[in-house]
Image (tube, rainbow, N blue to C red):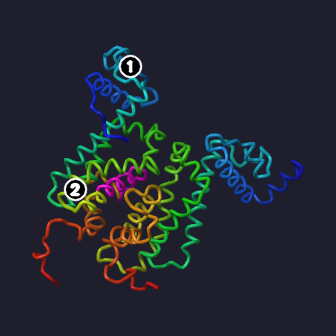
Amino acid sequence: MTASARRAHDEDEPGDVRSRILGAAVAEAGRTGLGRLRVDEVARRAGVARATVYRHFPGGRDQLAAEAVTWEVARYFTNLVRLLDGVDDLPDRLEQGLLRGRTLLAEHRVFQKVVDTEPERLLPHLSQSAPLVQAAMRDHLRPYLERARLQPGVDAEEAAEWLARNILSFLVATGGWDLDNPGEVRRLVRDNLLAGIVEPGRPGGNGAAM
Amino acid sequence: MQPAPVTTAPQQRALDAALELVGQQGVGATSLGLVARHAAISRATLYRAFPGGRDQLFVQLGQREVSAILAAVGTAIDQADDLEAAVAGALHTAAQRVQSHAALRYVLAHEPHLAVPFLGFTEMDRLLRVVRRALAPRLARFLDDGAAEWAAEWVARLFLSTLVNPTAEFDLSDRAVCDRLVQRYVGPAFVTSRLTATTDLVPTV
């Protein structure tokens, strides 16, 4: 593809080109690390001109790195939500979300490499998108709370924020819990995170389990 | 993060000086020369006190300040009459301590890259371990051992979560907010692990 043909092609579907560049940046970060991300390497991998990368990311490498992390975080949660399709009972959804969310992270090669070798570069980006991620998770959980059998006086909005904060905390650090153990995740979710939220007694909290 | 080692007098003076300087201008601008001048000690003394140089000084300062916050949180737990008050008091004290800590506030606002490693993954797990070790024994007055460890970790998680993402509903510097959150969401989780055997006093429904 010549440079001008490439440009014409780029301008056909700007969203698509942008995603391709971001995907290439994530892959490059897995190869070289976030700190050594290079615009020309990303452009080559994405199959676009260097100028195209700068047109989409005028801030160059730093902007590219920041947006690539945010983009990959969004993709991670999109994948997670897809895996949870059909898991509509609140406690089940939280349990499966934690289990599969941890698995997705463990299987994410780029993430594992970056978190091992340069967490100090990854975490600033992650903490910047944390409020957005938390708000998105709160809004995502709210309808499941509204369908659950809540204890008297529980505010669904606040409880959704409570759960979002806790789930995010457990996704980034397991602490004293073994989150690969479904029994332990079940205890964490049902006996702890939801202890003050859903009515106990009936499995699933809203009586609609399975 | 290891528990803060015993500090010598010149170390103490240097750490106090560094703490003040960081509160005014951050870690990046605080050189050893500046610390020596501010502490009114010679550079030679300073280097003897911290053979590892600037890195050692700041690591030790961080450990000392975290230990101080945890000690204050421990005291708040000791003064509580029940588990809910202990957990709410712990959260509130931690939030207040950070709010009135000029150096920590400077770093969080202007040098976040120095603070964020503790907000996720390996370093956060290490910090959770430090908090469990410091606070679980204090919570053991109300809970059996396993539950006390978890309660201590939960305090740390909630606190860190609000540090990353402060919202009005979760403003832990407001004691009423701490009480409300703990009574609603935390207390009910520990119903079966409480040590005070009051079952025979509770009327059966």
* Picture coordinates of residue A111, whole percent (x, y): 58, 53
Q: How crowded is mark 2: few (under 14 residues within 10 Å), some or many (20 or more)?
A: many
Three-letter amino acid code of the residue under disc 2? Leu
> Disc 2 versus disc 1: distance between alpha carbons?
40 Å
Q: Which residue is drawn at 26% across and 59% down?
A: B148
> Which element type, helix, strand or loop, lies under badge 1?
helix
Task: Verify CB contact (< 8 Å) between mark 2 and mark 1.
Answer: no
Q: Quadrant of residue A61?
A: top right
Three-letter amino acid code of the residue under disc 1? Tyr
Does residue A188 lie above or below B162 as drawn?
below
Q: Marks 2 and 1: same chain?
A: yes
Q: Mark 1 points at which residue?
A: B47
Q: Which of B152 and B2 is in front in this view?
A: B2
Q: Residue at x 39, y 82 (%)?
A: A206
Q: Is residue B164 left or right of residue B95?
A: right
* Picture coordinates of residue B144, whole percent (x, y): 22, 62
Which stretch did the figure color magenta?
B152-169
Q: Residue at x 49, y 69 (%)?
A: A97
Q: In this view, does B191 lie to the left or right of B41?
A: left
> Which element type, helix, strand or loop, lies under badge 2?
helix
Give the numbered dot on residue B139: 2
Q: Which of B65 and B95 is in front in this view?
A: B65
What kind of secondary structure does the magenta stretch mostly adopt?
Answer: helix
* Picture coordinates of residue A113, whole percent (x, y): 59, 49
- Parent chain of label 2: B
Q: Is residue B74 left or right of residue A87?
A: left
* Picture coordinates of residue A109, whole percent (x, y): 61, 55
Q: Which of A58 and A189 is in front in this view?
A: A189
Q: Quadrant of the C terminus of chain B?
A: bottom left
- Magenta-span inclusion, residue B162: yes
